[in-house]
Image (spheres, helix red, strand yellow):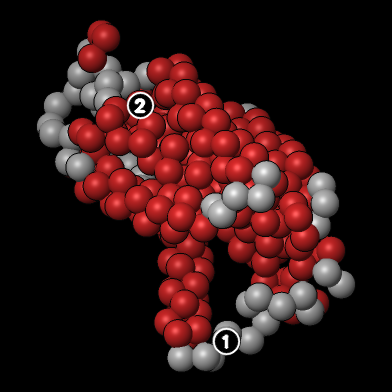
Amino acid sequence: MLGRSGNPTLNDKTFDRTGHGSYSGTDRMTINGTVNKTFITLAVLLGAAFATWNLYFKGNDVMPYVIGGAIGGLICALIISFVPRTAPFLVPVYAALEGAFLGALSANYESAYGGITMQAALITMCVFFALLVAYKTRIIRATENFKLGVFAATAGIALVYLASMVLNMFGVTVPYLHDSSLIGIGISLVIVVVAALNLVLDFDFIEQGADRGAPKYMEWYGAFGLIVTLVWLYIEILRLLSKLRSR
């Protein structure tokens, strides 16, 4: 049985919501199909990101795209997570909204630290391929203890970020979380590692989904989970690099 995934969009209950029994032939989820859907989703996200990026550097106000992309992306992500059958229709929409948000965010970092976005993107891709190779060669195995550890670490980070958002409303900041001290850099580095390890769980989810004969639309769901993790990893790497640059 598929174990826990640190990525909240990918877990055992997801397969429960797809119905019972396995599918066959063209109705069955495949790894190649998921890879294709991931490339499509990534292309949509990058297209939207470049659009808001260009708007930012042309002097346009991109704040509506930041707010709309963040809120709209969150709504789409929640619907997809609870109703996986909507993935083929909503994942491209999610990618466009998330791309609009990410493009504006990246442009803001780029204006403050020239070249930082290219560095973050390259590091993200290198980490992705390194972990994919490590997973395929079984250097890293998604054991139950591994999944539990990543899940606990991811949940802990999510709670810290949530607490930070709530406290910020009252003018209180969480020590070290956002500063460029050595402790702050260390915290960001730990978060980057946890985000990266979630990729291993995503790979395992997709592989087991294909082995278990999940329905074809789960290819879009698997692509969605990978993009969620990649976006998180990229943002955390951006934050880490910005802290290093500001010292």
Question: In this orientation, which residue lies closer to the viewer: 159 or 194?
Answer: 159
Residue at (33% x, 42% y) in the render: 2
Q: Name the residue carrying label 2.
A: 219
Question: In this orientation, which residue lies closer to the viewer: 2 or 10?
Answer: 10
Q: Does residue 64 appear in the picture of this structure? A: yes
Question: In this orientation, which residue lies closer to the viewer: 184 or 136?
Answer: 184
The residue mark sitting in front, 2 or 1, is 1
| Relative height, residue 167 to residue 146 (above, below) | below
> Residue 200, image x and y in percent?
53, 42
Q: Name the residue carrying label 1.
A: 173
Residue type, mark 2 in image = Glu
> Residue 69, image x and y in percent?
43, 50
Disc 1 residue crowd, few under 14, some 14–19, many 20+, Cα 10 Å = some
Q: Earlier in the sequence, mark 2 or mark 1?
A: 1
Residue at (32% x, 21% y) in the render: 29
Q: Determine the image quadrant of residue 184.
A: bottom right
- 187 with respect to 96 (left or right): right
Tally of marks: 2
Q: Which mark is on residue 29?
A: none
- 198 with respect to 238 (left or right): left
Q: Are marks 2 and 1 in contact (CB under 8 Å)?
A: no
Residue at (50% x, 84% y) in the render: 168
> Residue 181, image x and y in percent?
79, 79
Residue type, mark 1 in image = Thr
Question: In this orientation, which residue lies closer to the viewer: 12 or 222?
Answer: 222
Q: In the picture, which quadrant includes the C terminus?
A: bottom right
Secondary structure beneath dot 2 equals helix
Q: CA distance from mark 2 to mark 1?
A: 40 Å
